[in-house]
Image (cartoon, grey):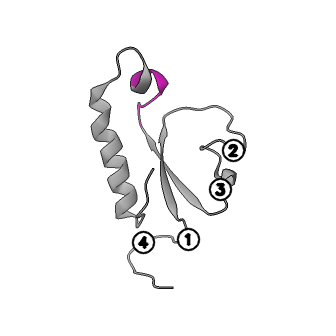
Amino acid sequence: MHLTGGFTNYGQDIGILMLDTVFPRIPGDIGNARSYPFPVRYKTVKNANPFTVMGDAPDAGLLAPFVEAARELEAEGFKEVF
């Protein structure tokens, strides 16, 4: 195993971008970390919710916060961001 320095924590294989929602997430749901056989890290995209992302008039201004959140995960050492 080869580790590179500069990160606060290690061992999380995948970074997942999440909508800014709050509701129960049962195992099997992408928002429940126990759905995966490996550690994951979440990054919530502020103000991104089902209505602003997939509604009748999606907010194109949310593209930048998604890109920023993905870049934050990359800066934290994640090579895979979903």
Earlier in the chain: of badge 3 and badge 1, it is 1
- Examine the structure image and report whether residue 73 is included in the region drawn in magenta: no
Within 10 Å of disc 1 (Cα), the crowding (few <14, some 14-19, many 20+) is: few
Spatial distance from mark 4 to mark 1, Cα to Cα?
11 Å
Disc 3 on helix, strand or loop?
loop
Question: Looking at the rendered structure, which numbered label has been put on residue 36?
Answer: 3
Q: Which residue is mark 1?
A: 11
Whole-percent x, y for residue 5 in the image: 39, 80
Earlier in the chain: of badge 4 and badge 3, it is 4
In this rendering, the label closer to the viewer, 2 or 4: 2
Image vertical order of residue 31 relative to residue 6, above or below = above
Image vertical order of residue 4 relative to residue 7, above or below = below
Q: Which residues are magenta?
A: 46-52
Spatial distance from mark 3 to mark 1, Cα to Cα?
13 Å
Q: Amino acid at mark 4?
A: Phe
Within 10 Å of disc 2 (Cα), the crowding (few <14, some 14-19, many 20+) is: few
Whole-percent x, y for residue 3 in the image: 45, 82
**Residue at image x 39%, y 14%?**
56
Image vertical order of residue 61 relative to residue 16, above or below = above
Spatial distance from mark 3 to mark 2, Cα to Cα?
8 Å
Earlier in the chain: of badge 3 and badge 2, it is 2
Residue closer to the observer: 7 or 40:
40
Spatial distance from mark 4 to mark 3, Cα to Cα?
22 Å
Q: Which residue is mark 2?
A: 28
Disc 4 on helix, strand or loop?
loop
Question: Left or right: 5 with respect to 11?
Answer: left
Q: Amino acid at mark 2?
A: Gly
